[in-house]
Image (cartoon, rainbow, N blue to C red):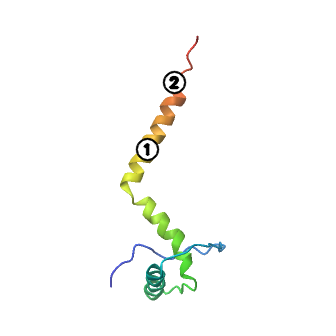
Amino acid sequence: MMKLKLGPLPDDKPVKVSVELPAKLHRDLVAYAEILGRQGGQVVEEPARLIVPMLERFIATDRGFAKARRRVSENHQERDSVPPRVQ
């Protein structure tokens, strides 16, 4: 059996999301929810609940984003650590 990138969904308070998806993407989201349910034994009644964990996983594994984020953080730290100029 293949391993999906998403694991069990956290049992937390649902949040209503309103977004327009292309029909093909919605069908894929529904299919992913069905497969995830079969693999993990957790029924995903609302496939839209997959959107947040998918985005979190995508962002967490995006090396380019992580590198850019570190660069921005380092720039902020450098700027904050430089004493102000006396005129």
Q: Amino acid at mark 2?
A: Val
Vertical relation: 72 (above or below) 66: above
Q: What residue is at 49 percent from the left and 87 percent from the top?
A: 41
Indicate the quadrant containing the N terminus: top left, top right, bottom left or bottom right.
Answer: bottom left
State the mark number for residue 82. Answer: 2
Percent coordinates x, y for residue 72 in the rendering: 46, 41
Q: Residues within 10 Å of mark 2 (few under 14, many from 20)?
A: few
Residue found at the very far top of the displayed protein: 87
Q: What residue is at 47 percent from the left and 80 percent from the top?
A: 29
Indicate the quadrant containing the C terminus: top left, top right, bottom left or bottom right.
Answer: top right
- Circle 1 residue: 70
State the mark number for residue 23. Answer: none
Q: Secondary structure at mark 2?
A: loop
Q: Amino acid at mark 1?
A: Arg
Q: Does 6 sit left or right of 83 as displayed?
A: left
Percent coordinates x, y for residue 3 in the rendering: 36, 78
Q: Give the Cα separation between the discs numbered 1 and 2.
A: 18 Å
Q: What residue is at 39 percent from the left and 58 percent from the top?
A: 62
Vertical relation: 55 (above or below) 63: below
Q: Earlier in the sequence, mark 1 or mark 2?
A: 1
Q: What residue is at 44 percent from the left and 59 percent from the top?
A: 60
Percent coordinates x, y for residue 46 in the rendering: 57, 83
User: Looking at the image, which is closer to me, 38 or 31?
Assistant: 31
The quarter of the picture where residue 70 lies is top left
User: Looking at the image, which is closer to me, 21 or 3?
Assistant: 21
